[in-house]
Image (cartoon, rainbow, N blue to C red):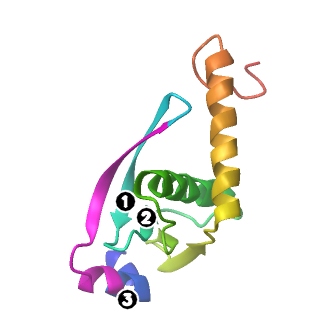
C-alpha cells in the first residue's frame, strides 16, 4: 500500500523534501476555544498533507474541511496561506488537491466559530447530532 502512494508525484516529493515534518501537533485558539489536531505532513513552505486510508469517499467535503481548518489555523498562526493542501489516499495511490483561498478559509473560520458557539450552548459540552437533540 505504501508503495502505491510512494509512486505518486506527492509521494516522491515527500521522499525528496528536506525538512518535511510528520505528525505536527496543531494548537489554534479560536474565539477562546482551543482547536487541536495533528497535521500528518507539513512541507517547509507550509503545504499540508493529510493521509487517508480505506475506501475513497463519494463526498470529499468533510476531509476538505479538515484540511482547510488546518490551513486557516496555520494562516492565523504564521501569517500566510498555505500554498496547497493535499488529501493523500494511500491505499488508492490518489492525491486530491484541496482549494485554499482567502474566501474559503474565512468560510471555514465562520463554520468553526459556529461549532464553538454550539459547543458552548450544548448541555453535554459536545456537538450533538439531530437524533440526540
Using the image, determine if residue 129 lies above or below residue 59: above
Residue furthest out toward the front: 79
Q: Secondary structure at mark 3?
A: loop
Q: Residue at x 73, y 20 (%)?
A: 132
Residue drawn at 33 percent across, 75 percent down = 2
Q: Which residue is mark 1?
A: 40
Q: Are marks 3 and 1 in contact (CB under 8 Å)?
A: no
Look at discs 2 and 1 and give the one toward the viewer. Answer: 1
Specify start and end residues of the magenta stretch as a single range. Answer: 13-29
Relative vertical location of residue 93 with respect to residue 120 in this rendering, above or below = below
Q: CA distance from mark 2 to mark 3?
A: 15 Å
Residue occupying the point 39% across, 68% down: 46
> What's the distance in space between the residues labelled 3 and 1, CA to CA?
18 Å
Picture coordinates of residue 129 (x, y %)?
A: 72, 29
Q: Is residue 118 left or right of residue 79?
A: right
The residue carrying mark 2 is: 51
Question: Considering only vertical position in the picture, is 10 above or below 60?
Answer: below
- Closer to the chain start, of discs 2 and 1, is 1
Among numbered discs 3 and 1, the one appearing first in the sequence? 3
Secondary structure category for the residue under label 2: strand
Q: Nearer the viewer, residue 75 or 9?
A: 75
| Badge number at residue 7 | 3
Residue 127 occupies which quadrant of the picture?
Answer: top right
Q: Quadrant of the C terminus?
A: top right
Judge whether residue 28 is colored magenta: yes
Q: Is residue 46 magenta?
A: no
**Residue 43 in view of the camera:** yes
For label 1, the SS is strand
Q: Is the residue under label 3 in contact with that under label 2 (CB below 8 Å)?
A: no
Amino acid at each position: 500500500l505504501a508503495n502505491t502512494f510512494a509512486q505518486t508525484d506527492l509521494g516522491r516529493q515527500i521522499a525528496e523534501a528536506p525538512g518535511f515534518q510528520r505528525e505536527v501537533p496543531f494548537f489554534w485558539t479560536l474565539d477562546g476555544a482551543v482547536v487541536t489536531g495533528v497535521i500528518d505532513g507539513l512541507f517547509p513552505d507550509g503545504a499540508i498533507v493529510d493521509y487517508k486510508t480505506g475506501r475513497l469517499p463519494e463526498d470529499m467535503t468533510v476531509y476538505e474541511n479538515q484540511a482547510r481548518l488546518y490551513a486557516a489555523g496555520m494562516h492565523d498562526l504564521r501569517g500566510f496561506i498555505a500554498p496547497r493542501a493535499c488529501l493523500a489516499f494511500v491505499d488508492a495511490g490518489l492525491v486530491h488537491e484541496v482549494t485554499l483561498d482567502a474566501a474559503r478559509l474565512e468560510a471555514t473560520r465562520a463554520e468553526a466559530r459556529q461549532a464553538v458557539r454550539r459547543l458552548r450552548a450544548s448541555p453535554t459540552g459536545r456537538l450533538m447530532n439531530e437524533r440526540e437533540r
